[in-house]
Amino acid sequence: MPAYEFHDEYTLAETADKLGQKALNLNLIPSFVVRYFADSRQYYIPNEQESQPLTPEQAYMCFKKLVETSGE
């Protein structure tokens, strides 16, 4: 049985934070911003044109894809 990195929304957001930091350290993204609210977080990954807020789920999938395709 695989060991999951997250079990609820809070641990999913924490895992997304860690993956975002890893992507940042690997120079895969120039920066990212996390807006903290009482019950949720929004992630922003700036690009040339715009930056749409991402949910923790969307940010996790985006960061995971970037890190996996980098080979690290």
Image (cartoon, rainbow, N blue to C red):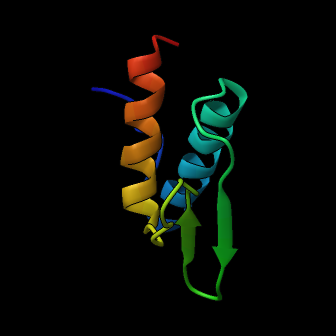
Q: Looking at the image, which residue is at 54% across and 79% down?
A: 40
Q: Looking at the image, which residue is at 55% across and 47% down?
A: 15
Residue 25 position by quadrant:
top right
Q: Looking at the image, which residue is at 57% across and 74% down?
A: 41
User: Looking at the image, is 28 positioned above or below residue 16?
Assistant: above
The residue at the far bottom in this view is 38
x and y, in percent, of residue 66 in the image: 44, 31
Q: Nearer the viewer, residue 32 or 41?
A: 32
Q: Nearer the viewer, residue 52 or 59?
A: 52
Residue 65 position by quadrant:
top left
| Residue 8 seen | no
x and y, in percent, of residue 69 in the image: 38, 20
User: Looking at the image, is 28 positioned above or below residue 56?
Assistant: above
User: Looking at the image, is 22 positioned above or below residue 50?
Assistant: above
Residue 46 position by quadrant:
bottom right
**Is 69 on the left-hand or right-hand side of 33?**
left
| Residue 1 seen | yes
x and y, in percent, of residue 37 in the image: 64, 85
User: Looking at the image, is 51 positioned above or below residue 68?
Assistant: below
Q: Looking at the image, which residue is at 60% across and 33% down?
A: 23
Specify the quadrant that holds the N terminus.
top left
The residue at the far front in this view is 49
The residue at the far top in this view is 71
**Is 16 on the left-hand or right-hand side of 8?**
right
Q: Nearer the viewer, residue 9 or 53?
A: 53
